[in-house]
Structure formats: structure tokens, C-alpha cells
Image (cartoon, grey):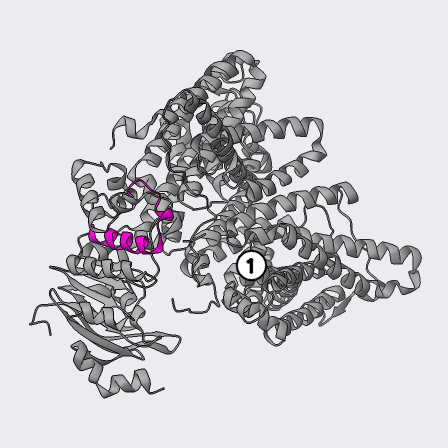
């Protein structure tokens, strides 16, 4: 299949597809980071994670409309405000969900899966009732439009670069929070030994609630980023949930680094193959590849070895 | 090596978890019909040794020979079929099933999928279950869900589940942990009775209990054998005293 | 095998009889053909729910990919019916007569090789039962022998369901794409769209369903069923009682797949088409909720659950389409939170005791059966990663 192209063209194709893959990578990483915290650290399967992301996207959409209407002068900066609002909203909703639903199900992970699926159906219908069934898009501020020419044939879009920078920043932030901050230490302590953590004075209930909220909040930011590269509809989140779960599982559920590496592998494989095959076959092959590896190495790429 | 008829000979056994050697070049020989008690401080690798023998943990190197069979290459259920039975530290029984069903499931027949599908609860099974139930003091509890038993009764039930398998080598991880004094006395009696004609490995913290039942004692420390012999000899071994009292 | 009395105790015989009367007498007498056909369609999901009771309720294996097997069974049957509907006479106007219409639209000029054997009914019947079961066998072999279970198994089966859907939609020349295989008319020359055919198919469906129920009952009341229950709570103990746990999981997963496939084939026959909407993630997870609503531990509950949820779905989405998703979501959440063992447990806990009280007043002794405990009191082990991976305590 490569023979139809010259070497020069092939390089350009790989570079462009690689870049397109990087944007997919960014969204997957942001989605997966939140999920990895919730699943990897708490063992909860949040099937409504995609809906939390979409909530972030809708918040971004609303903010952009408010800015366009009332503060057109500040429109260039709306995205930053939107992102913060998206985070706060999804964070609070996440804490509410943890309080109302998840905390009753900690010992039954398969049941969290069913219950959060129910939650996702309700959220989808709320979005449909409030925002309509049609997909909505945001208008980008001028500075994010256009693209940057690397060489004569390779061009990269600026919003893509922005989304990637955002992803890197957030990934570093999450890493710092989980592995360098006192709060992260508490979370990890609770994960490893709940009764002991509780005995040394950690408020495990609060840690659970905030952890779940944080995972959802990151999904909200992912939603903000999502608006730059796709349009938002009530069921857009559902399309990503299986991919995201595979990313998390593939990476080894408890390893943030693994999550990032696996998101990179999956998005690049998909994006590169997409050019040569139809989109659906690329997806089939990617998923098959991941499922195949998982069957060989069920603990994921970066799992810890634990004595039992 | 096995000119003498050891039931179990463990040689050069090592397992490491990410570089940490929980069991390090360990060798251990158990005679036919012997009751061996393994003692040692926390983290000495006692439970890990049992895990290695019964196939729960894969060894890094070394060999475990049970009669003529190399256990390190076998899976758990094959090791059970070979005649090794294992009791866990925390009672591990089927809470959702009745005491009778718990024992029946452990009866060594109908162990394949289709064997289980066509398994018949015949008189031989019923008799055997009753016999074992009496031995473990649970003859009046057969129809009770096992989840309702007391902690001590659960321990007995698990021992009964092993007995009905008719193992040649019985491995018990702290069989009297969490028992009342009366239960403990009954258990010692039970163990004495069931160990006849079998080889037994017991992990125990309770020295008095260990002394009561042991033929020989092995002291583990940091994944290695520190001392071995009669209880008396081991208790007077300066190395053992150093480990138990030295820090 | 145990005696009939052990396998069919009195209480279960009564449950069988009530269900049989309801489905074979009451419904056919009380409903018109359209409604009866609808019930028949709902009952095809009951096959799946029944399989899930064994896999999930008894064995603790949650598959989120039952749509795969339902779909494979359904597609096998649909291929046979489609070939019959695409005789050269019927398709004379196509550029290549004699092949299914969607192939012609997709510029195929020849029947693909894997379609050829579906000209034969006996091959089709074998394929309906074998293709999904063998597929389940290999999935099970790959996963359970490597001790993948619990959440991981659920997610991987879900991914496989997603893969299959994308594949079916993407390869429309071979599969009919997103519309599926439609316009099915006759079965060996017998028009399946007439009212009389629908009534007959309803009863064929019932016979199959009761066969599956009896198989499920035999498995459940046998030592095999008790091993499944034991495995759900204490996988490791079962292993150390000398059982190869993976084989039992593979077996029950295959049975679940077989049941689902029969349901799928009957769906195609009764509804007259098959499409990827019944294969993917969403239908697969809806099948799980049918089972959960009825009661994951009750084979009869699974059937009532399938009927009730689908009745509700139809009436809700006819009159208040926007409310349906709310109701469905609330159903998921409330079943999981308040009735983890579904309607069957409501019946067991609230209705049966009242009956018993009445009987007791008349001086009839009533045997008290130990109730199977819920998933709540399962063992806590300390190593979380280990739990998640092996799924033993999930």
C-alpha cells in the first residue's frame, strides 16, 4: 500500500497523520487521566465519564455564547474562563454523584458500572432536553484559527497545538497532585490500605469524594478541549467511553505514565492506519490490537508486581 | 537426592518480587508421616513457602518435589489432584452454600465440567460427608449456610474440606488463629487425630501449640532456614534466640 | 445426574407451570397477533437474560458483550432467509441477479464465499448454535485461562461488541451495513410475515425458551451450579479444592452465548430483519439490565424482567419518548442500589413470607430454605489489584 507514494510524500503523510493523531491523543489522555484516577485509584467503573466530558463541552459552548453576546471585547480569552467553569461544574457534580450513588457501591465494582450507565442515560436525556438533539459547535477566537506551516507540505493547525499544550500542562498538574502533594499521598494511602489510612486520621470519605470529583473535573476540562476539534451532541461522550476504558486498562490501571503511553500508542496507530484504510477498519484493527495485547498481558503495560 | 523416602523435598527455592527475595535459596525436607511446624517472625516468608508449594505463587528458581512429581511446573488444581491440601490463614469457605454442600464440593469426584454436571449425590458421598462432619464437630450444622458459622467453626469446616480430599500432604496456615481456648483445645485434638498416616506442614505462632503437635520444627528468617530440629533444640539455638529477642 | 425431584423441587415446578400457563395460554388468548408477536420479540431477549443469570448471577462473570452472540445467531439466520429471498427470479432487476440486494448496490458481482453454505438450512441451524458458542469458547479460553475476570472481562467483551458493530457497519457489501439484513420473507417457502406464521413462530420460540430454562435449571441444581456459586465468592478455594476454575467459566460463558444465539435467531425469524443495532454496546448493556431487574439469581426472574422492561420500553417510548431514557436510567440506578437481586428478591422477601404465614395458620409446616446470600457479604481481601484482575471477589 506504500508503493503508490514517493518517499517525500510518505514522510509528509506520516507527519500530518501523526499530528492529527496527537490531537486525538490529547482528548484521549484528558479523558483517560480522569478515568484512571477514578478506576485505578478507587476501582470504580464510571460509565458516565463521557457525559461528564460533554458537560464540560456544553459549559464551554455556553460561555462562548455569553462572551459573544455580552463581552465581545474579551472573546479572545473566553476559553480560559470556560475551562475553569467546566472544571468547577463537573467537579461539583462529580462530588454530588459520589455522595448520592458511588459511595454505596465501593465493594461492588461491576454494580458501579451498571449504576453509572444509568446515570449516563439520564444525563444524555437532560442534555437533549436542554440543548436539543442537534450537535452544537463553538466559534474559535481569531488567534486559534489558521495553521502554522512547518515545511511546504506539512501544516499544523494552531488549535491543535494549543490543545496539546493544555494536555501536557494538565498531565503534569495531575502527576504533581497525585505523586508530589500531600493530598495525593492521602489518596494513595487510602487506595493501598483503607482501614490503616483511616486509623492514622485520614478522612477516607472526604478523600473518596474529592478524588471522584477531581476525576470528573478533569473530564470537564477534556470537554473544553473537545470543543476545539469536534462538535458537541448529547451522545458524543458515549462514543469515547470504550476507547477511554481501553486506554486506561491497556496502560495498567494504576499507572498515570502507562495511561499516557497507551493513549499515545492507540491514537497514533489509529490515525496512521486511517490514512491507508477506511476509518472503520483502522478502528477495528486498533481495537483488535489492544484487545489482543490485553489477552496476552492482562495487567496492562505498566502494572506493578505485587506480592500476595 | 531422594534416596530416602521424603514426601516433600524443596531444594534451592527462590522467589523474588521486583528484586525483593521473599524466599531465598530455601531447602526443606519432610518425611513420610511427619508433622512439621514452621515458625518465624512476621515477614519470614512462611506463608510464601506454602504459596509456592501449592502453586499459588510461581517460583523464580528451585525445585519442589512431591513424591516423584515436580510441583513447580503444575497448576493449582493439578497439585491438589497429586495429593496436596492447603488451608488458608483466614478461613476460606463458601459462605453462600450449606455446610453439607461445602464438604460435598470438596469430595474428590466430578472435578471436570462434565463430571460435575453428571455428578450424583450417592450414599458413599453422603456417608463420607457425615463422617467428616462428625470429626470436625459440625454434624448438627450440615444444613446451615456456612456463612452463619462462628469463626472457629469456619476454621474447622475448612479443615474438614481438606480432609474429605484425602490429601497425603496437608498444609495448614495458622489453624488456631482467632480461636477461643476451648476451641483451641478441641482443634489440637482434631489435628492429632487427622494427622495419623499423613504428612503435615503447619505454620504456627503459638509456641505452646506448636510444641504440642510438632515432630520437628523449622525456623524461617528472611526467607531462609535459620534452624531446624526438635522444639527443644530449636528453642535453645542461639541464632533463634537472637532473632526473636535480639531486636 | 440427580433425581428429577432434586432438580425440580415443588416450588420450582409451580414456577414453571405458572410461567407456562401465562406464556402459552393467557397471552395467546388475550392478545392480538401484533401484540403476541411483540411478546415473542421480548422473549428472545429472555434467552439472553437467562444465559446471564448463569454467567453473571451464578458464575460472577459479567459479560457486556452478549449482543455479540445474539447478533451472530441472528445474522446466521438472516443470511439463510436473505438468500432464500434473493432467488434469481426475485432479483431479476439487479445487475447481478441471485445475490442479496445490498450486495448488488455495493457493486458486488458474486456471492462471497462465507455466504455460500447458508443456502442450506441444516448448515444454518448448526451455524446458529456453533458460531457464537465457538467464538465464546475462544474468548473464554484466552481470558479465563489467563485469569482475566471481573471488570477487565466486562470491558474487553464490551470492546469486542464495539469491534463487531464497527465491522458490520463498515463492511456493508458483505453484511448489509447499518441497515442490516432486511426484507426477509420466507422460510423454506413458508411466508413468515403472515399472522398464522407469527403465531406458530411464537410457540416455536416458547418451546425453545422452555428447553433453555430446563437446561439452566439442571445446571443450577447440579453440582456444577454449586461450583459456580462457590467460584463467584471464593475462586481460589475452588481452585484448591482441585477444580480447574477456567474450564467452568468457559463452559458457563459458552452456555450463555448459545442461549443468546438462539434468542437472536428467533428474533430474526419473528421480526423479519437483523441489524447492528442489536449487536453493539448499548443493546448488550440493556440485556444485562433485563437480567438485573428480574433478579440475577433467578432464572424465572430473568424472563419476567425481559418482559417487563420491554413492555415498559414500548409503552413509554410510544407515549413519552423523552421520558424513556430517564425511566431507564432511574431503573438501572434503583435496581443496583435498592434491589441488587431484582424482582425475584422482592418476591422472595415480601410475597413468599406472607403466603407462608397464611399456610402456617392452617397448621401446615413449611420447609424453610436457606436463602442464597446477596453479593453484599463477599470476602474482603487486602490486595485490590489482585481482586480486580482475577475478579474473584467482584
Please state the horizontal and vertical placement of residue A132, each as a whole percent of the image: 77, 42
Please state the horizontal and vertical placement of residue A107, each as a whole percent of the image: 51, 54
Residue located at (12% from left, 59% from top): B196
Please state the horizontal and vertical placement of residue B101, each as a whole percent of the image: 29, 42
Choose between C60 and C379: the one closer to the eye. C379
> Residue lying furthest left in this view?
B3
* Residue A145 in view here: no
Bounds of the magenta segment: B142-165
Please identify the dominant SS of the magenta region: helix
Left or right relative to A240: residue C234:
left
Choose between C32 and B187: the one closer to the eye. B187
Residue B10 is one of the magenta-drawn residues: no
Q: How many marks?
A: 1
Q: Quadrant of the C terminus of chain B?
A: bottom left
The residue carrying mark 1 is A39
Left or right relative to C165: residue B171:
left
Subunit of mark 1? A
- Picture quadrant where residue C262 is located: top left
* Residue B76 in view here: yes
- Picture quadrant where residue B79 is located: bottom left
Q: Quadrant of the N terminus of chain B?
A: bottom left
Amino acid at each position: 500500500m506504500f508503493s503508490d507514494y514517493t518517499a517525500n510524500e510518505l514522510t509528509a503523510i506520516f507527519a500530518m497523520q501523526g499530528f492529527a493523531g496527537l490531537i486525538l491523543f490529547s482528548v484521549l489522555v484528558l479523558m483517560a487521566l480522569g478515568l484512571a484516577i477514578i478506576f485505578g485509584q478507587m476501582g470504580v467503573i464510571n460509565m458516565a465519564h463521557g457525559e461528564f466530558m460533554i458537560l464540560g463541552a456544553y459549559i464551554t459552548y455556553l460561555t462562548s455564547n455569553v462572551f459573544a453576546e455580552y463581552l465581545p471585547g474579551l472573546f479572545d480569552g473566553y476559553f480560559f474562563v470556560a475551562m475553569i467553569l467546566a472544571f468547577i461544574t463537573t467537579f461539583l457534580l462529580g462530588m454530588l454523584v459520589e455522595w448520592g450513588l458511588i459511595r454505596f457501591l465501593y465493594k461492588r465494582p461491576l454494580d458501579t458500572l451498571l449504576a453509572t450507565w444509568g446515570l449516563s442515560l439520564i444525563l444524555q436525556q437532560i442534555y437533549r432536553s436542554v440543548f436539543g438533539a442537534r450537535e452544537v459547535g463553538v466559534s474559535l477566537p481569531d488567534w486559534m484559527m489558521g495553521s502554522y506551516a512547518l515545511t511546504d507540505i506539512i501544516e499544523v493547525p494552531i488549535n491543535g497545538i494549543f490543545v496539546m499544550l493544555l494536555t501536557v500542562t494538565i498531565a503534569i498538574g495531575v502527576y504533581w497532585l497525585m505523586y508530589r502533594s500531600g493530598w495525593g499521598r492521602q489518596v494513595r494511602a487510602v487506595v493501598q490500605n483503607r482501614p490503616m489510612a483511616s486509623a492514622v486520621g485520614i478522612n477516607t470519605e472526604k478523600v473518596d469524594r474529592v478524588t471522584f470529583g477531581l476525576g470528573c473535573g478533569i473530564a470537564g476540562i477534556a470537554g473544553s478541549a473537545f470543543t476545539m476539534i469536534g462538535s458537541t451532541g448529547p451522545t458524543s461522550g458515549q462514543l469515547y467511553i470504550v476507547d477511554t476504558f481501553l486506554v486506561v486498562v491497556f496502560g495498567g490501571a494504576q499507572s498515570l505514565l502507562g495511561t499516557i503511553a497507551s493513549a499515545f500508542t492507540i491514537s497514533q496507530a489509529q490515525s496512521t492506519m486511517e490514512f491507508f484504510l477506511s476509518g472503520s477498519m483502522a478502528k477495528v484493527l486498533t481495537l483488535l490490537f489492544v484487545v489482543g495485547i490485553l489477552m496476552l498481558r492482562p495487567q496492562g503495560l505498566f502494572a506493578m508486581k505485587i506480592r500476595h | 537426592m531422594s534416596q530416602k523416602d521424603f514426601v516433600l523435598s524443596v531444594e534451592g527455592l527462590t522467589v523474588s518480587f521486583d528484586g525483593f527475595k521473599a524466599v531465598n535459596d530455601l531447602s526443606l525436607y519432610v518425611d513420610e508421616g511427619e508433622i512439621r511446624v514452621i515458625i518465624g517472625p512476621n515477614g519470614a516468608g512462611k506463608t510464601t513457602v506454602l504459596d509456592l508449594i501449592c502453586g499459588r505463587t510461581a517460583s523464580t528458581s528451585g525445585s519442589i518435589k512431591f513424591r516423584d512429581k515436580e510441583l513447580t511446573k503444575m497448576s493449582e488444581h493439578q497439585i491438589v489432584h497429586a495429593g496436596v491440601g492447603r488451608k488458608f490463614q483466614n478461613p476460606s469457605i463458601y459462605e453462600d452454600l450449606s455446610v453439607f454442600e461445602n464438604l460435598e464440593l470438596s469430595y474428590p469426584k466430578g472435578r471436570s465440567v462434565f463430571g460435575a454436571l453428571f455428578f450424583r449425590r450417592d450414599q458413599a458421598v453422603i456417608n463420607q460427608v457425615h463422617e467428616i462432619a462428625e470429626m470436625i464437630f459440625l454434624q448438627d450444622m450440615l444444613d446451615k449456610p456456612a456463612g452463619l458459622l462462628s469463626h472457629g467453626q469456619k476454621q474447622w469446616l475448612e479443615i474438614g474440606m481438606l480432609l474429605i480430599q484425602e490429601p497425603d500432604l496437608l498444609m495448614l496456615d495458622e489453624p488456631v488463629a482467632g480461636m477461643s481456648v476451648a476451641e483451641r483445645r478441641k482443634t489440637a485434638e482434631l489435628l492429632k487425630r487427622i494427622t495419623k498416616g499423613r504428612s503435615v506442614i503447619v505454620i504456627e505462632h503459638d509456641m505452646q501449640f506448636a510444641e504440642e503437635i510438632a515432630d520437628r520444627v523449622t525456623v524461617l528468617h528472611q526467607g531462609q532456614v535459620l534452624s531446624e530440629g526438635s522444639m527443644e533444640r530449636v528453642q535453645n539455638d542461639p541464632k533463634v534466640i537472637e532473632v526473636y529477642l535480639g531486636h | 445426574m440427580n433425581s428429577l425431584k432434586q432438580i425440580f423441587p415443588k416450588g420450582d415446578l409451580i414456577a414453571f407451570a405458572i410461567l407456562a400457563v401465562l406464556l402459552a395460554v393467557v397471552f395467546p388468548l388475550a392478545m392480538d397477533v401484533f401484540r403476541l408477536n411483540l411478546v415473542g420479540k421480548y422473549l428472545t431477549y429472555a434467552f439472553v437474560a437467562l444465559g446471564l443469570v448463569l454467567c453473571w448471577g451464578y458464575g460472577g462473570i459479567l459479560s457486556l458483550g452478549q449482543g455479540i452472540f445474539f447478533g451472530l445467531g441472528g445474522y446466521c439466520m438472516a443470511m439463510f432467509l436473505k438468500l432464500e429471498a434473493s432467488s434469481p427470479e426475485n432479483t431479476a432487476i439487479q445487475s447481478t441477479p441471485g445475490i442479496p440486494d445490498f450486495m448488488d448496490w455495493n457493486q458486488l458481482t458474486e456471492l462471497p464465499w462465507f455466504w455460500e453454505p447458508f443456502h442450506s438450512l441444516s448448515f444454518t441451524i448448526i451455524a446458529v448454535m456453533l458460531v457464537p458458542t465457538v467464538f465464546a469458547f475462544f474468548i473464554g479460553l484466552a481470558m479465563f485461562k489467563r485469569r482475566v475476570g471481573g471488570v477487565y472481562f466486562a470491558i474487553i467483551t464490551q470492546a469486542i461488541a464495539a469491534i463487531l458493530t464497527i465491522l458490520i457497519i463498515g463492511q456493508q457489501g458483505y453484511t448489509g451495513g447499518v441497515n442490516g439484513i432486511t426484507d426477509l420473507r420466507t422460510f423454506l417457502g413458508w411466508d413468515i410475515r403472515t399472522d398464522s406464521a407469527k403465531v406458530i413462530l411464537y410457540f416455536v420460540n416458547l418451546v425453545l425458551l422452555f428447553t433453555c430454562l430446563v437446561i439452566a435449571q439442571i445446571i443450577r441444581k447440579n453440582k456444577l451450579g454449586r461450583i459456580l456459586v462457590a467460584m463467584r465468592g471464593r475462586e481460589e478455594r475452588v481452585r484448591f479444592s482441585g477444580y480447574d476454575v477456567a474450564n467452568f467459566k468457559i463452559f458457563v460463558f459458552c452456555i450463555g452465548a448459545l442461549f443468546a444465539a438462539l434468542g437472536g435467531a428467533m428474533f430474526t425469524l419473528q421480526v423479519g430483519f437483523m441489524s447492528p443495532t442489536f449487536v453493539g454496546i448499548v443493546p448488550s448493556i440493556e440485556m444485562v439490565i433485563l437480567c438485573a431487574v428480574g433478579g440475577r439469581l433467578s432464572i424465572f426472574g430473568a424472563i419476567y424482567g425481559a418482559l417487563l422492561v420491554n413492555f415498559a420500553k414500548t409503552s413509554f417510548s410510544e407515549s413519552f419518548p423523552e421520558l424513556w431514557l430517564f425511566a431507564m436510567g432511574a431503573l438501572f440506578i434503583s435496581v443496583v442500589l435498592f434491589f441488587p437481586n431484582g424482582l425475584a428478591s422482592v418476591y422472595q422477601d415480601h410475597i413468599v413470607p406472607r403466603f407462608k404465614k397464611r399456610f402456617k395458620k392452617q397448621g401446615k409446616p413449611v420447609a424453610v430454605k436457606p436463602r442464597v446470600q446477596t453479593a453484599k457479604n463477599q470476602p474482603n481481601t487486602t490486595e485490590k489489584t489482585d481482586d480486580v484482575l482475577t475478579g474473584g471477589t467482584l
